[in-house]
Image (tube, rainbow, N blue to C red):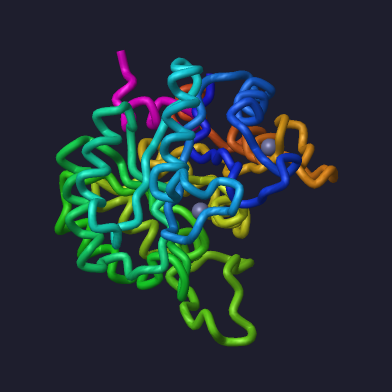
Amino acid sequence: MIIDFHQHIIVRQSTDPASHRTAEHVLAHLRHHGGGKAVILPNDRGESVAPSFEGQGSSEYDTELALDAWRQWPDEIVPFCHVNPLRYDALDAIRRYHRAGARGFGEHKVRLAFDHPACLPIYRLCGELGLPVLIHFQYGVYSYNFEAAEAVFRACPETVFIGHAQAWWANVSAEVRSDYDAPDFVGYPPGPVVRGGLTDRWLEEYPNVYGDLSAGSGWNALTRDPEFGPDFVRRHRSKLLWATDCYCLDGKGAMAGGHTQECFAARTLPWLREHCVSEDHYADITYRNAMRLLGLEN
Ligand SMILES: [Zn+2]
Ligand SMILES: [Zn+2]
């Protein structure tokens, strides 16, 4: 049993059906690694939809795909919803999606400050409704003012925030660069971690803050410093969520373009097996913490 806390269905970013990643691909991916549940994260960037899907509405479309997949495979799919905060009906849409079955909000990947005035009422509503909020933090681009996050975590204590992406995971180290437009800026900083990073401290201090280990950014945080990573997963065993954000179609690395690459699950699950201190610890990170956050515990 595993819960992959970061998966996407992609059918609107290209008009070429051969490049689509459907719910069936998500399920093949999950089942190849032993089966369980996949959290489907829509993302409403407020950008226009591809021509072939005109008329379906970009706000509705991604979330409806997630909900449809859940209706078809209720035991394996966990649907989230997402609405761009600048939409005039954002709060009503979230209430509607919650009633329709959405279990969380995200991937919140928008070109806005994390504490933008339109975002705060959304975070509060998600707290009231029990929807965890999954954030993509990336300097200069998405929820770009990372340092503002602590004040938001304090202001919305009822809301569960799950951090993800480059800025979130670079900040396991206290020595971090935010000068994203410098020519030598790196989003995935290598080498030793200086203890006391913001992400590490926030996971420790805020009961409402969690970390999504997916993608190159999560992997980099775990592996850039062989002393740090194993200690980090031990200290935060109740706050980390295993996830892949892997785009491969089958769990074996087949990509939509016809090439293959290493499946992210195949890389990360063995690392966790090796560095978790017990079967219980491994279970916490690969599914129990997720079950608790999603309200799926018996
Ligand atoms: Zn992301
Ligand atoms: Zn994969």
Does 156 sit left or right of 177 as displayed? left
Residue at (60%, 42%) from the top-left corner? 11
| 239 vs 84, nearest the viewer | 84
Q: Is residue 86 above or below residue 33?
A: below
- Which image quadrant for residue 160? top left
Out of 278 and 28, give the one closest to the viewer: 28
The quarter holding residue 171 reads bottom left
Magenta stretch, overall SS:
helix
Residue drawn 30% across and 28% down? 100
Q: Is residue 271 above or below residue 114?
A: above
> What residue occupies the far bottom of the structure in this picture?
182
Name the residue at 49% across, 59% down. 48
Residue 221 x %, y %: 55, 56
Percent of width and height locating residue 279: 52, 22
In front of the other: 243 or 199? 243
Q: Is residue 101 visible to the viewer in this orientation of the structure?
A: yes
User: Relative to 187, does residue 46 appear above or below in the rendering?
Assistant: above
- Residues in magenta? 285-298
- Residue at screen point 14% across, 58% down: 155
Quarter location, residue 182:
bottom right
Count the marks: 0
